[in-house]
Image: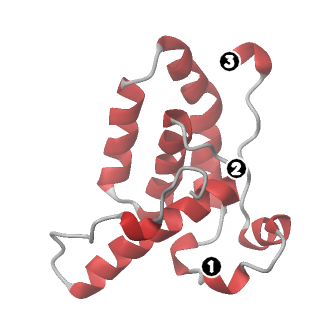
Amino acid sequence: MGSRNFSPDDRPPVRFMETEEIAYVATRAREVHDFWHTLFGLPTSLIGESALKVIEFEQMLLPMCALSVVGGTARFTAKQRKLFYQHYFPWALQAGMKCSDLMCIYYERHFNEDLEDVRKKWGIIPAPPPQQHAI
């Protein structure tokens, strides 16, 4: 985020939520999204964002996550679409189902821990690198 001159505080507040509790959960989901990129080893590219939305859907069952995947993949080239559906999509489904409930983690208490240790503790399967011939 630093290299892109971006801060989570730059995001506008969550709106259109029925209760303050739901607004808090939506805000927290936005806050931890960037942590999940690191935990799962996903780039901030369109493919990486789409794969993370699959994981978010598995974790939160929010229809907007599934719709984001549909919308994001519609913008892919044929080569990107093939890579996503053959490589990232199956991995993301499995990774999202097998890990802990990631919305219930107080991430800020784990900043001093080794990345591989927290991945293991929370059952996180990092994204495998795509095969060179598939790219």
Badge 1 amino acid: Tyr
Image quadrant occupied by the N terminus: bottom right
The residue depicted at 39 percent of the width and 60 percent of the height is 61
Q: Position of residue 50 (x, y in %)?
A: 48, 40
Question: Looking at the picture, which amino acid does disc 3 mark?
Answer: Ile
Count how many numbered circles sit on residues in the image: 3
Q: Examine the rendered structure and indicate whether residue 38 appears above or below residue 76.
A: below
Residue at the image position 37 percent from the left and 65 percent from the top: 10
Mark 1 lies on residue: 107
Q: Which mark is residue 41?
A: 2
Badge 3 or badge 1: first in the primary sequence: 1
Above-or-below relation of 64 to 12: above
Camera-nearest residue between 31 and 20 = 31
Looking at the image, tell me whether mark 2 or mark 1 is earlier in sequence order.
2
**Residue at label 3?**
135
Coloring scheme of the render?
Answer: secondary structure
| Disc 1 residue crowd, few under 14, some 14–19, many 20+, Cα 10 Å | few
